[in-house]
Amino acid sequence: MINHVVLFKLKKYQNSEKEQILAELKRMLLVLKNKIPELQHIEVGENYELDAKSFDLALITHFDSVEALDVYRVHPEHQKVVAYVGEVTEARAAVDFEF
């Protein structure tokens, strides 16, 4: 199996707006489970500290294979999330590994 881990750092926003953006991004990510069959498992977690200097949101997903991850990467529903991420984040980090 492949574990795909992504961290997101939002651009500078007021706390109320940041909370709304985090909630929307979390919602968008979680609904992918019902839209992309190759996605076996998904977890999305917000950093408990809203003003943390580290990343704001973590995504953990599992796939049966690298090929399944590749299908997810180009899937139109995932690409909608990618577009939103591009609008609201200043940094992103990802790691993919077998487990």
Image (cartoon, rainbow, N blue to C red):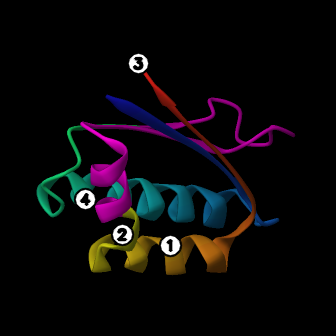
Q: Residue at left 79%, top 42%? A: 51
Cα distance, mark 4 to mark 3? 22 Å
Which span of residues is magenta-colored? 44-72
Mark 3 burial class by Cα count in 10 Å: few <14, some 14-19, many 20+: few
4 or 2: tag closer to the N-terminus = 4
Q: Amino acid at mark 4?
A: Leu
Marks 4,3: beta carbons within 8 A: no
Q: Amino acid at mark 2?
A: His
* Side of 15 where 82 appears, left or right: left
Marks 3,2: beta carbons within 8 A: no
Q: Which residue is mark 2?
A: 78
Location of residue 23 with respect to 63 vertically, above or below: below
Q: Secondary structure at mark 2?
A: helix
3 or 2: tag closer to the N-terminus = 2
Marks 3,1: beta carbons within 8 A: no
Q: Residue at left 76%, top 66%? A: 13
Marks 1,2: beta carbons within 8 A: yes
Q: Which residue is mark 4?
A: 32
Residue 21 placed where, x, y %?
55, 65
Location of residue 32 with respect to 61 vertically, above or below: below
In this rendering, which labeled residue sits more in front, label 3 or label 1?
3
Q: Secondary structure at mark 1?
A: helix
4 or 3: tag closer to the N-terminus = 4
3 or 1: tag closer to the N-terminus = 1
1 or 4: tag closer to the N-terminus = 4
